[in-house]
Image: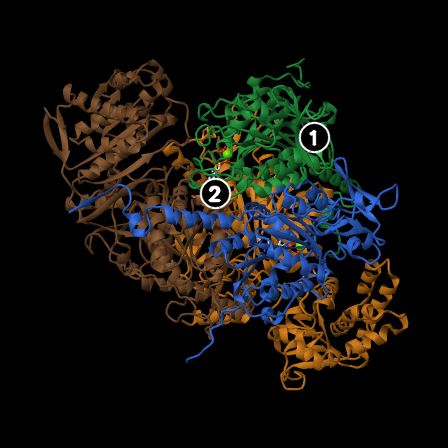
Chain colours: A green, B blue, C brown, D orange
Amino acid sequence: MENQIIETEIIQLTKEDFSSDQMVKWCPGCGDHAILHSVENVFPNLGIRKEDFVVVSGIGCSSRFPYYMNTYGVHSIHGRAAALATGVKLANPKLSVWMITGDGDCMAIGGNHFIHTIRRNIDINILLFNNKIYGLTKGQYSPTTPKGHKTKTSPQGTYERPFNPGELVIGAQGNFFARVLDTNPKGMTAVFMEAAKHKGTSLVEIMQNCVIFFNKAHELITSRETRDDNQLQIEHGKPLIFGKEKNKGIILKGTRLEVVTIGENGVTEADLLVHDQYEKDPGVHMMIARMMPPEFPVALGVIRSVAAETFEQSMMDSIAYEKEHSSIKTVDEMLNSGGTWTIE
Amino acid sequence: MENQIIETEIIQLTKEDFSSDQMVKWCPGCGDHAILHSVENVFPNLGIRKEDFVVVSGIGCSSRFPYYMNTYGVHSIHGRAAALATGVKLANPKLSVWMITGDGDCMAIGGNHFIHTIRRNIDINILLFNNKIYGLTKGQYSPTTPKGHKTKTSPQGTYERPFNPGELVIGAQGNFFARVLDTNPKGMTAVFMEAAKHKGTSLVEIMQNCVIFFNKAHELITSRETRDDNQLQIEHGKPLIFGKEKNKGIILKGTRLEVVTIGENGVTEADLLVHDQYEKDPGVHMMIARMMPPEFPVALGVIRSVAAETFEQSMMDSIAYEKEHSSIKTVDEMLNSGGTWTIE
Amino acid sequence: MTSKNSKVIELEQVVIRFAGDSGDGMQLTGSLFSDSTAFAGNDFATFPDYPSEIRAPQGTVSGVSGFQIHFGQKTVHTSGDLADVLIAMNPASLKANMRWVKEGATIILDSDAFVEKGFEKAGYKSDPTLDGSLDGFKVIKSPVTTLTKEAVKHLDLDMKTTLKTKNMFALGIVMYMFNRDIELINKYYEKKFKANPLVVDANKAVLAAGFNYADTLEIFVNTYKVEPAPLEKGKYRNITGNVATAWGFIAAAERSGRPLFLGSYPITPATEILQELTNHKNLSIKAFQAEDEIAGIVSAIGASYTGALAITTTSGPGLSLKSEAIGLAVMTELPLVIVDVQRGGPSTGLPTKSEQSDLLQALFGRNGEAPVIILAAKSSADCFYSAFEASKLSLEHMTPVILLTDGSLANGSEVFKIPRVADLPAIVPPLAEANDPDYKPYRRDPERLSRKWAIPGTPGLRHRVGGLEKEDGSGNVSHDPLNHQKMTFLREEKVQRVANYIPEQTIFGSEDAELLVVSWGGTYGVMLTVVEKMQEQGKSVALAHFKHIMPLPKNTEELLGRHKNIVVCEINNGQFVKYLRMNFPQFKYQQYNKIQGLPFMVAELETKFNELLNQ
Amino acid sequence: MTSKNSKVIELEQVVIRFAGDSGDGMQLTGSLFSDSTAFAGNDFATFPDYPSEIRAPQGTVSGVSGFQIHFGQKTVHTSGDLADVLIAMNPASLKANMRWVKEGATIILDSDAFVEKGFEKAGYKSDPTLDGSLDGFKVIKSPVTTLTKEAVKHLDLDMKTTLKTKNMFALGIVMYMFNRDIELINKYYEKKFKANPLVVDANKAVLAAGFNYADTLEIFVNTYKVEPAPLEKGKYRNITGNVATAWGFIAAAERSGRPLFLGSYPITPATEILQELTNHKNLSIKAFQAEDEIAGIVSAIGASYTGALAITTTSGPGLSLKSEAIGLAVMTELPLVIVDVQRGGPSTGLPTKSEQSDLLQALFGRNGEAPVIILAAKSSADCFYSAFEASKLSLEHMTPVILLTDGSLANGSEVFKIPRVADLPAIVPPLAEANDPDYKPYRRDPERLSRKWAIPGTPGLRHRVGGLEKEDGSGNVSHDPLNHQKMTFLREEKVQRVANYIPEQTIFGSEDAELLVVSWGGTYGVMLTVVEKMQEQGKSVALAHFKHIMPLPKNTEELLGRHKNIVVCEINNGQFVKYLRMNFPQFKYQQYNKIQGLPFMVAELETKFNELLNQ
Ligand SMILES: Cc1ncc(C[n+]2csc(CCOP(=O)(O)OP(=O)(O)O)c2C)c(N)n1
Ligand SMILES: Cc1ncc(C[n+]2csc(CCOP(=O)(O)OP(=O)(O)O)c2C)c(N)n1
Ligand code: SF4
Ligand code: SF4
Ligand SMILES: [Mg+2]
Ligand SMILES: [Mg+2]
């Protein structure tokens, strides 16, 4: 029994540490598979012990995710993942909490918890699988379905303007917003790493493809033919450039963004808007998050990443302060505090 | 019985047409009284028959409002006024639907219906009584309570950044947002009239004072001493000017707003940002809605007012189209449609 | 083109089960066979058995999709217990369905799929067709895939399209087996694939190939025939419970003159009601897909206040979420129909399975004393009449109604005699008249105790309602103690008086039967089948099947009182029996409960009832 | 400084009611009198009667705020039926409270407020002190306002501050009437208004003025005294039900070694539990005010998964909203305590009134078969022990518990003997051990059937839970029919076995009493008072008051079986009696129900029980 080595260091983990033994049951070709792989690649490289991850989800195809990860996890009820993740994180702020959700789960029924969690800036990482449809219930429109799109519940097309997750996140005081494609594993890995490191609520919108109920929802952005004109990979400190020839860019003209061609009308790279993901004022981040084809390319990458105190940090500080300063230190003291009298 | 005059014209109504016989039970000095008066002044002047108004609310001090108006009305359950108003408006798009709500009612428990109603652009008028506190339940913090403020449930101050209603409205695709003070009856009347006329969801944030649980919440903006520096009455087509001497203004410098003094550093009125409430791109509206003391004055008046198709209009159009184009015109035809067979 | 070279045997009733991978098109196969069954004049009922995953890995047990049809020359009450014929397109389908197959049944297999890879995916250790697993069955192994390919070779199709038609080969075999005419199906192809003649040709060719294969190779010693059922004269259609529910509301809207408004949020297995109603804008129906269940019901309450026939549709978890708002409808005394298509619980539970476990929630799942009317549909077609009656009661009595159906009824389908709307009962909601000087929001009808419905836009009736306790008559907010007690009693009594407006409880069988079988809701078909069967055997068994739950029919006590031996059968842990005990504690009840996400089987009930008769 | 010139009469018990406008400080007046009552060694209980409006128009009936105290030299079980003494600061207070006053009681009025304007606002047509309305009462009209002004004239205060002290004049009168020492109260002023010596002086002066006025003017023929009650030795405090509930959880967290997490949303009358817990960060308590009730409970479930003693607190409408999530806690078999402080329903109902009408919702308000443990606190002080026991049962049996209290218990207060935490029962949650090679998420303790609690962060125990049906043992998602049935039974049985861990039901009175009175929850005090009284009169009445609702104590059936004549008394339309009928249909139950948002009165129960005894 002697000389046993007590493990104190964090050992390097591998993908295998996180694969669960459950059969993955998403449809063949579903974008969810690729996201799962990316997450499995990211977790071992965060320097976090494997027992310190908690993966939480609501209900939906995407929300089956926790079953496929060998971590602590909860597959909760529809729309409530953010509230559940909040409870996990507040109960133990040391855990690395990941929330997996769909566009219906977190923007339809779960909309309220979503905006409040973001507002509170609780340090959880939210991966929003935006396939712009209700997958699990077989094809009704969601709050992100493009206006006019025909689905099982909108046979003549929807009447509703969709949410743009980035806009809603910023409107709810969000400090971290990034957008990635399920077809880009490298992009996902990089963004998930950044999201993990960000203190506060990180929201990653993953443009995910549902092959069955809304195939090619993101085709304009992802297809070989059109993607160069419709994607803009943003990077902090770099100008906003895109296009096959990398000769198109975005400028801020007066109160609006505009697409320009470098070399035309005397435009040079120096005229372009330079991305500052750390800028506190969300005005321009909002404009960037709003960019949509056909007028604009879609911005991919980290759009906003601003440091701010987290809810749980304030809470823990307040607890520490009260523990130190309150005259009542034990439960017995509490019971005996204030007006009491003794019968002898 | 002959020669009876059938009333076909809309007769001019008066304030008395709308006062109910119920005793008004808000605390003396509560800002709600003034809002009630303003609404009673606005309703008779909208050219709408008195029986075509429906006033809907949730639960809270403010939500007692429908009882004090002699209209059709529903005092519903906490947080659900927007959903109820949606049902009223969709069932009969001809009605003038007003929703009365508090910061807790519509931004805490009712947050989800709030953002979805706005996104759908249903033509209802929402008056949000923002006293930054839960009044009816006697003084707990709300989602708009300033960070650090001490209330019954935040004895050491809140940990949460508050929502700014304007930002959230814009993040939810809102097309009409205005802000007024309960101490300014004229301002309220003017804005309520504009809200009523706007087609689509109109959101009016009323900075309302709760004398009991958060007295002077808006003092910096309303008090005689500080208001000139902290209020900016915006008007469409006019530059953003404020200050006692009307010599301060707002410019858009690069990607941010900035306060300047006219006459200093060569700044003239022509340099100032001119308000365009009809601008579709919400970027600058968002910046204006965000302005807060001490850096900025608070913008009052109509910040955003953009025309767009309403949900109910799309719905009625779709119904009209289908009624015309469907081969099935009656319920009997529906029952007999598709595969049937006859036993003789 | 039917040609025979085998003996035709006449059968009274048959159960066929089609099973294959999710992608194999078993639902279409089944539904085409149903069409031909209708054409043949049989009575029938069907049930789809979807996998719970959208498209689980191909070839695995969790990806199997099934379709069962039960047809007969007598009235058919259920989609059948165990199958006489199983079509299994791959090993996983066989594995998943063996427990649904009758002893001695015919099993038709695609032998091309019964290979090593398929066994592995299905989790078979050895070839079930060789290891004795299928002893006692008539197994017909046909190289369906190969023959399908052959059949369309001349059309030069791509492999994917080719393989998509192999279900039609299987259908052809079954059509032959039951002496059916394949022309009807050919017509369907022509209509459905109008835009794509190649696909029409392919399907026709494969269907014929299957039919002829069965004929030519004499794979059946006999073929079978089921004579037409003696159905009443009239026009018929096949209808699922969910569509019937939607249509019942549409008919009620028509008969009441009130526009129909649905506020709903998708949830399995209730979603199709919403989907069906979004398809009827031509009839001015407003179906609103809300952001969640709460917005669904609350928007419906808003529409109800505004004069609509307002409904909301959901399943168990959604009913939980609607609890608070149902209380608002109770307090405001507004009409509202809440449909709960029950599924396996608790929590998310077994979303694709059926159960009757929301009854107590429907009765009691609200704060305070908040009684509502409760109905439970008894069959897929009855969903139409239940939705209609729920609307009528809600509108005429100005109080919310919960209509309970379940996953089996919702997805199952049966033959439905098409009614004429004008023949349905009139619905007369108590509308207040414009400028009525005596109008008071909570003045009541002396018989029904319902208040009047005053609709926004009507002159002279402006009034406010809300969730705080109301003063009787005026409807003003009231904290008066005695008024609260009075209103509590009035709300209760209003619901109880509905007993005067519903039919008395009927009993199937003799009033002095030795054993009274009690059931409710969706189990009607199987209960009737068993009791009928036992009565034919001369057993003294009667059935009281309840459709009206709250209030119970007026004669319930008297009816139960006539029987010493009562057994209450439910697909839950005993909820209706609790309710009966609470209402009529003077009687003794035995129970039979099944909580497996599965319907009752005729055999298990028969065993149980015989046991009780012999006690 | 007590001086007397009148005879002192000894009383066994007294009920005093202080009533005034919301702004008159009646709650403070009452609570200061309570302090002095504690000091006098009496047992006592109090109840505040807040207006439902925050601050309704001054002088109106809806703006009246009251405070009642019942104290005695014997054990006091309730805050009292009708008052012996009423202090009415204005006509509206008199009007609102006349129905709470005993015949012949003493009524002390501020005559300065009994003027035309006051009558009008209160809705009096004529002066009640002159028109004979108060015949039969001892009416003492004192110019309280005038004399208060006089008393502080020397301090030169503004009028607002002056008028704010007039409640102290009234208090002074009552203190004199009951021979109380005013020094204690002076000390309170000194502490409370330390920062403002002028206010201290003013209050002292006015209190003394009231006291001396009563003495000097000999307004009482006699004064009164209540001897100390024979309370057990020990340290005592006054405690409200809501604070007791909060503290019970804090103590349970301490005894279980589990950190306390509350997820809640404010709602009357439950909010104070949340407020009280936010005040105890010094004890590491995490109280999270969520955006709504659903987030409240679901965050608590998250915290529970993470190893906290997790609770959520609400009232009826909030419990409705939590229904779905309770099902998740049932399915995941996690500990969770849900407190429902019941109020008048349905819907928003009567938020400031108390009722017992959420019992059936607590039992059945969830989709599917979703049993939970249910406890009901029996008094304000018992809320402490009930919260503690609810925590213990939930943690040790790994299943949610609903704790029912009500508005009366929550806001009422009574004398509470302070326990030592170390003397409370141990709480030992079934924590899984790190790296346990045998760990399986749903492996069960053979006795309790509880699964183990494996807490995130612990090595070797990673696992997933969720709302889909679970395979027993492994906890994997399972659609297996027999597993579902098994799990349904296990969840039910786990709750039923709690009966082995709770005390047997006790009965107050003789086992063969002619009439067995049955009650539950917050009515304990009044039930005991009546039964005690009738037993003293030699009546054959016994009381079985239930605190454990689900499961019922093991001896319930036996106990009920011993009595032919059973009456179940509830502040609802008969919910517990329904539950008893459903469980023990073999017995006959009579009912006594009151649904007025008011507690039972001793007299009404006595009348009813006598009637039943004479049947
Ligand atoms: C309370 C409740 N309401 C509704 C449902 C039905 N439901 C399950 S998932 C889902 C939406 C799924 O869409 P999304 O969140 O976008 O996830 P996806 O399947 O597309 O990944 C719905 C409506 C449910 N399970 N529970
Ligand atoms: C379901 C439910 N939860 C909680 C409450 C309690 N409640 C009533 S009003 C209110 C908040 C009121 O605040 P706000 O909406 O800001 O209105 P105000 O009173 O300030 O006008 C709360 C928490 C309730 N009535 N119903
Ligand atoms: S239905 Fe769509 S989202 Fe769901 S698993 Fe299949 S492809 Fe993925
Ligand atoms: S509590 Fe505040 S918000 Fe409510 S009525 Fe009084 S002053 Fe107004
Ligand atoms: Mg989706
Ligand atoms: Mg407020």
Q: Can residue D453 be seen in this view?
A: no
Towards the viewer: C135 or B316: B316
Mark 2 Cα within 10 Å, few/some/many (few <14, many 20+)? many
Q: Do labels 1 and 2 share a chain?
A: no
Residue A251 badge? 1
User: Is ligand 1 closer than 8 angstroms to the Cβ of mark 2?
Assistant: no
Mark 1 Cα within 10 Å, few/some/many (few <14, many 20+)? many
Drawn side of residue B175 relative to residue C410, left or right: right
* Farthest-out residue, front: A265
- Tag 1 subunit: A
In the rendered structure, which amino acid carries the disc numbered 2? Answer: Val
- Tag 2 subunit: D
**Which residue, given by chain and number where applicable, does mark 2 sit on?**
D495
In the rendered structure, which amino acid carries the disc numbered 1? Answer: Ile
Disc nearest the viewer among 1 and 2: 1
Residue drawn at 66 percent across, 18 percent down: A7
Residue B232 badge? none
Element at label 2: helix
Element at label 1: strand
Above-or-below relation of D465 to B73: above
Drawn side of residue D340 relative to residue C522, left or right: right
Above-or-below relation of C398 to D292: below
Q: Where is residue D465 in the image (x, y as percent from the top left)?
A: 51, 32
Q: Distance between the residues labelled 1 and 2?
A: 66 Å
Image quadrant occupied by the N terminus of chain D: bottom right
